[in-house]
Image (cartoon, rainbow, N blue to C red):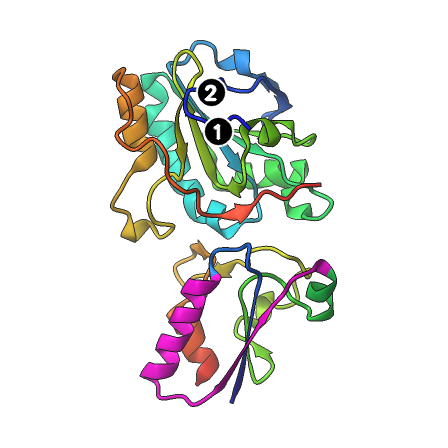
């Protein structure tokens, strides 16, 4: 479990839907790194993925990278296979990296339980925010922009006012 | 009228869906036997042809028949809203139509 604030980001080396392998060091030049435990099949992920793409685009010029990681067991949930990930990324025009954690090691290292579940790391790759993207799965009802607020704080060198929120979504599908 | 409300506790959408269903029933003055059933295992999901949580059947007919045949699974069910968005709970319109 690494969900305690201040915990180090887990090392990883995972294939992305772009055909490249991505490691933690691949993002070494960024000022903040957002890891998102994610998947294809979950309606909560689908409800939030457009907002996640918008955040990835809005913060790209500010030294932030957003990386979604799917660790779900594709045997029990074939919609979450790597092929389906590539398809969904193309269809939805994801602006974030989307990596396949088939061994489920990243989910275990993060202590992730839900999809979507967000982990924000600062320049030193220490966990500064953990939880939900915002406070409502229905975009029209959002009043608290947890992830955007956390990124603004981290980029400004301060502590997020809200550093932990409950992640609302599907369970990670363990093997 | 009999309404079966099938849910899997690990998906957080069932309280919202249940509340919406009760609201629609009350607004439309529909008298119905609301029978709740918690699905606990994959075997049970297959036995009940449960495509995800929540699943709502009115007199045996799924409120979203087009998606009712999805692979049985302990998972959150996807409902497609009229505006094209995905949702973990059915829309008010879907419920109203199913109860009409």
Give the x, y percent position of residue B4. Answer: 56, 78
Give the x, y percent position of residue A125. Answer: 44, 15
- Location of mark 2 (residue): A7
Task: Identify which residue is drawn at 41% across, 13% down.
Answer: A30
Circle 1 crowding by C-alpha within 10 Å: few under 14, some 14–19, many from 20: some
Residue A140 lies, with reference to residue B17, above or below; the image says above
Q: Is residue B47 magenta?
A: no
Q: Which mark is residue A160?
A: none
Dot 1 lies on which element? loop
Task: Identify which residue is drawn at 43% across, 9% down.
Answer: A29
User: Disc 2, disc 1: CB below 8 Å?
Assistant: yes
As rendered, which of B60 and B10 lies closer to the eye? B10
Q: Which image quadrant: the C terminus of chain A? A: top right
Q: Is residue B30 magenta?
A: yes
The residues tagged by marks 2 and 1 sit, at their Cα atoms, a distance apart of: 7 Å
Left/right placement of residue B55 relative to residue A33 reads: right
How many labels were placed on the picture?
2
As rendered, which of B4 and A26 lies closer to the eye? B4
Which image quadrant is residue B68 in? bottom right
Which image quadrant is residue A131 in? top left
- Location of mark 1 (residue): A3
Residue B23 lies, with reference to residue A162, above or below; the image says below
Callouts 2 and 1 in the same chain: yes
Question: In this picture, which residue range is highlighted in magenta?
Answer: B14-42
């Amino acid at each position: 479990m690494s969900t305690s604030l201040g915990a180090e980001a887990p090392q990883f080396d995972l294939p992305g839907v772009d055909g490249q392998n991505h490691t933690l060091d691949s993002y070494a030049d960024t000022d903040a790194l957002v890891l998102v435990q994610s998947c294809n099949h979950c309606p909560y992920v689908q409800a939030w993925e457009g907002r996640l793409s918008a955040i990835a685009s809005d913060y790209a010029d500010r030294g932030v990278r957003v990386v979604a990681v799917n660790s779900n067991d594709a045997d029990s949930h074939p919609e979450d296979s790597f092929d389906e990930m590539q398809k969904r990324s193309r269809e939805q025009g994801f602006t974030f990296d989307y990596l396949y954690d088939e061994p489920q090691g990243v989910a275990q290292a993060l202590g992730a339980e839900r999809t979507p579940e967000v982990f924000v790391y600062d320049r030193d790759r220490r966990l500064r925010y953990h939880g939900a993207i915002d406070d409502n799965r229905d975009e029209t009802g959002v009043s608290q922009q947890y992830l955007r607020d956390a990124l603004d704080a981290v980029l400004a060198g301060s502590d997020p006012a809200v550093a932990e929120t409950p992640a609302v979504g599907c369970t990670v599908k363990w093997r | 009228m009999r309404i079966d409300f099938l849910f899997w506790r690990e998906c957080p959408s069932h309280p919202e869906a249940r509340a919406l269903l009760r609201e629609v029933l009350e607004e439309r003055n529909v008298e119905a036997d609301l029978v709740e059933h918690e699905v606990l295992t994959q075997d049970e999901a297959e036995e009940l042809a449960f495509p995800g949580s929540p699943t709502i059947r009115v007199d045996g007919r799924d409120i979203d028949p087009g998606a009712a045949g999805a692979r049985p699974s302990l998972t959150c069910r996807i409902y497609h809203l009229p505006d094209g968005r995905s949702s973990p709970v059915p829309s008010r319109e879907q419920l109203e139509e199913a109860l009409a």
